[in-house]
């Protein structure tokens, strides 16, 4: 049996991959806080649905819609989740691939905070310009 927060994260990543932003939005708290490291156009802190989803739009625009995630594993308990994955996209004719750990804070069946930790921020910055 999987933990309910593991299912929440699996459903969220599947919805994101399918372009189902309505489902993704429903899984995020209204005041979600999102943290992206690095020095790219999407680096920084975002708060709330409007800012986070605008940043998602920038991600897709800067990669010509090629951005994707390959999940390796998801670990979750009552308050936290960790998703081990590889982010990839094509940018300027070159394939870019970066291993990451996504850290989630979870409460009452919603994602409340997100932290992205990339193995190589230089590659991540190259991915998002």
Image: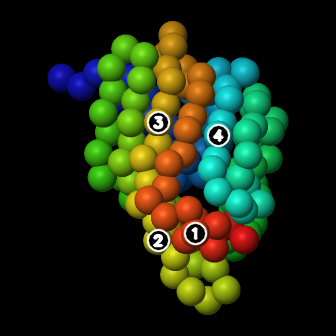
Mark 1–mark 2 CB contact (< 8 Å): no
Report, in whole angstroms, how far the alpha carbon at label 3 lies from the one at label 1.
Answer: 20 Å
**Which residue is identified by label 3?**
103
Mark 2: few/some/many CA within 10 Å (<14, 14-19, 20+): some
Circle 4: element type: strand
Image depth: mark 3 or mark 1 in front: 1
Which sits earlier in the primary sequence, circle 2 or circle 4?
Answer: 4
Report, in whole angstroms, how far the alpha carbon at label 4 lies from the one at label 3.
Answer: 10 Å
Report, in whole angstroms, how far the alpha carbon at label 1 lies from the one at label 4.
Answer: 17 Å
Which sits earlier in the primary sequence, circle 3 or circle 2?
Answer: 2
Which of the labelled discs sits on residue 97, or is there none? Answer: 2
* Residue at the (30%, 52%) spot, across then down: 72
**Which residue is identified by label 1?**
122
**Which residue is identified by label 4?**
35
Image depth: mark 1 or mark 2 in front: 1
Q: Is residue 69 visible?
A: no
């Amino acid at each position: 049996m999987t933990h309910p927060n593991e299912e929440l994260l699996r459903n969220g990543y599947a919805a994101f991959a399918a372009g189902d932003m309505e489902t993704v939005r429903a899984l995020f708290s209204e005041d979600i806080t999102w943290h992206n490291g690095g020095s790219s156009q999407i680096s920084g802190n975002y708060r709330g649905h409007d800012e986070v989803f605008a940043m998602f739009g920038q991600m897709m625009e800067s990669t010509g819609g090629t951005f994707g995630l390959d999940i390796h594993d998801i670990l979750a308990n009552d308050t936290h989740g960790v998703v081990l994955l590889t982010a990839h996209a094509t940018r300027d004719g070159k394939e870019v691939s970066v291993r990451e750990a996504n850290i989630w804070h979870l409460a009452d069946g919603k994602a409340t905070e997100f932290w992205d930790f990339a193995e190589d921020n230089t590659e991540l910055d190259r991915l998002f310009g």
